[in-house]
Amino acid sequence: GAVVSQHPSRVICKSGTSVKIECRSLDFQATTMFWYRQFPKKSLMLMATSNEGSKATYEQGVEKDKFLINHASLTLSTLTVTSAHPEDSSFYICSARGSRGGEKLFFGSGTQLSVL
Amino acid sequence: QKEVEQDPGPLSVPEGAIVSLNCTYSNSAFQYFMWYRQYSRKGPELLMYTYSSGNKEDGRFTAQVDKSSKYISLFIRDSQPSDSATYLCAMGVGSGAGSYQLTFGKGTKLSVIP
């Protein structure tokens, strides 16, 4: 299957700082990437959809100024959590579709964010 | 009624047992179906992808889709302790950039006891 790399796997930061998470498709070009948030023992919650070269589409209730998404190339999307607060602590996972428009979704390994 | 229903478990089975994981759905527009395996604090890993009703086998895993009943299953034969994980079903519609939509079940936590 296709490989999606996500970094960092774990980050601890102070309240008020910003954190950037990278998601890269290693062996395919990803026209569409998705960012999810997952709370313990809960399912995936879609935060936003990013398409290469255009603005991200955010799900209802997700603050676009809080969670900045950039999909500047066909292999890289970034999620920046700005002015992080303890309630932003969560497991964030990115995923990508292949550039041939396949339905299969491939996930990164996730980032555990802890805001102190 | 939620679009996709999946029993969260937990489900505990002895090593070597046959495991049956299920999801039901209400949206008849779903066209394709997937099963993911997620280990604790890791991203989901795609196990199976199916498009039509019927069975699809891959090693110890069999995915079954019954579109008339709106019911999908994942069977794991000869279960191993390494199969212990949360299994998520996913189903979707559309393939275009603006129409693609994937809906996930809540996941079933499986423990295979040695």
Image (cartoon, coloured by chain):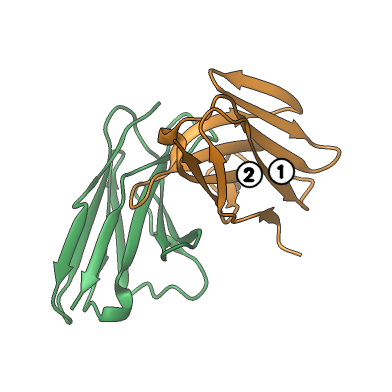
Amino acid, disc 2? Gly
CA–CA distance in space, label 2 to label 1: 5 Å
Q: Nearer the viewer, residue B88 or B111?
A: B111
x, y percent for residue B26: 78, 53
User: Mark 1, residues whose alpha carbon is within 10 Å: few (<14), some, or many (≥20)?
Assistant: some
Q: Which mark is residue B30?
A: 1
Residue A79 shows up from this direction: no
Note the chain letter of the green one.
A
Q: Nearer the viewer, residue A17 or A113?
A: A113
Callouts 2 and 1 close, C-beta under 8 Å: yes
Q: Is residue A2 above or below residue B12?
A: above
Q: Is residue A18 above or below residue A38?
A: below
Q: Label 2 is found on which chain of the structure?
A: B
Looking at the rendered structure, the secondary structure element under dot 1 is loop
Q: Label 1 is found on which chain of the structure?
A: B
Residue B12 shows up from this direction: yes
Note the chain letter of the orange one.
B
